[in-house]
Amino acid sequence: MNRPYLIPVIFLIIATLQTALSPFLQFDKIHPDWIVVIVLAVSLLKPISETLIWAFWGGLILDMFSDTPFGMFMVSMLIMAYLANFWQGRIRNSFIFPIILTLPYTVLFNTTVLLLLQIFGYQVAWQETINRVIFPAGIFNLLIMVVVYPSMVMMQK
Amino acid sequence: MRSRNTLNLIYLIAIILLVGFGLDRLGYIHVIRGFIQTVVQPAQVLVADLFSTVEEATTPQESLEQLNHENELLRFEINRLLVENIRLREVEQENKRLRELLNYTRNNADIDYTVAAVNGRVIGSDPSNLIFTIYINIGTRNGVAKGMPVATSRGLVGRVSQVGPNVAQVILLIDPTSSVNAIIQSSRIHGIVKGEIGGMLLMENIVQGAVVSPGDLILTSGLGGNFPDKLVIGQVIEVFQRDLDLFQTARIRPTVDFDNMETVLVLTSFEPVDIELELFPESNVNE
């Protein structure tokens, strides 16, 4: 990105929209994670240094909007982005594969958050949360990726 | 590691993370969060208003009005019956206790739900699916302070966790950080109701031998000074009892519909008590 200072502004706008619209866009208490999906799309398209910058700002903004110990979302986002970046350059001609990858990587992101929450003393019902929150959220995010990934590919061109 | 620049970037992020974590422990991150929330609050209100208007406009007018009317009547009836039911049960319990212990006749046993309250409209929720907080469009300018309980006519919603001039963040009862001292209405047994990630409620520390059954109503006990007593929390739907355990646990279904909250009441007349500060003021001053 030519103007890296725009990244926090973009995420701030998205986070504001996400917090304001999530009560309307939710389905069975689950709403889409726009920031996670965007960071994931960037990770699949951009080099590692740029990916880490996007993941850093995305995680930081989520940390600022959540009443949780600082850094939880940032660490989870960085781990997810770093691992997803493995596919960068390897899946250039595929549109389906990056979309399918959304499910395991958002599951990884949310599971890392959950793990950190437990480390910080939160009570976690793992099975219930994985079944009722993490997998449905992964599928919701996968559906969003159908729009986000092609849009980002087009913007990159 | 792919290059020196990437390595430097990772070091920089790690330093920022450590500094941020330290600042969070010292309480400074709350100030930054409060500032950000105050800045984005007008935009949140605008977007929420806009979306509400669009949603209303795209719903067929006739059916919307009819449904709204029916919905309003039903909600009113449910709330009235719920409150009346609880009030009657409380009156019955109190009557029984007074007869048994003090040989008193029933005397003025109404529950006082008429507290000073301010209406707050829900303008947003946590961006994550794992944390349950909401933002409301009132703050210190409306007399809201940190720790104040938040409720609807159906029961307890949570407590104010952060507050700015025009916006407040409310930790919902179902959030995993939430913990409320509670009582089972029928048996007067105490326990602690905690939120679970996944949006469920668990009542823990129920003594073995206590009779807990699905359908039992759970109210706030007032112990600990963080919440007023007799606010409805929910109903028992499942009991986990094993002879090996010290305590029983019950799964609770909250009476509040957390998915469809539009307006909440902040109980501004209730001042939470910091028991540690009250009992040991000197040790807290020294810290």
Image (tube, coloured by chain):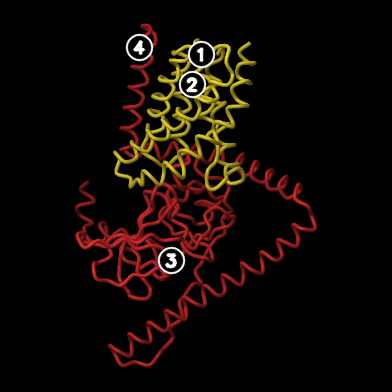
The lab-note entry on whether marks 3 and 2 share a chain reads no
Residue A122 position by quadrant: top left
Query: Are the two marked residues, 1 and 2, in contact with CB atoms closer than 8 angstroms?
Result: yes
Residue B279 position by quadrant: bottom left
Residue closest to the eye, A153 or B280: A153
Secondary structure at badge 1 equals: loop
Residue B74 position by quadrant: bottom right
Residue bearing the label numbered 2: A54
> Label 4 is placed on what type of residue?
Leu
Find chain B in the image and tell me its colour. red
Number of marks in the rendered image: 4
In the image, A41: left or right of B162?
Answer: right
Q: Which mark is residue B7?
A: 4
Q: Which of label 1 and label 3 is nearer to you?
A: 3
Q: Which of label 4 and label 3 is nearer to you?
A: 3
Residue bearing the label numbered 3: B235
> Label 1 is placed on what type of residue?
Lys
Residue closest to the eye, B237 or A155: B237
The lab-note entry on whether marks 2 and 4 share a chain reads no
Residue bearing the label numbered 1: A46
Query: Callout 2: 10 Å neighbours few (<14), some, many (20+)?
Result: many
- What's the CA distance linking mark 1 and mark 2? 10 Å
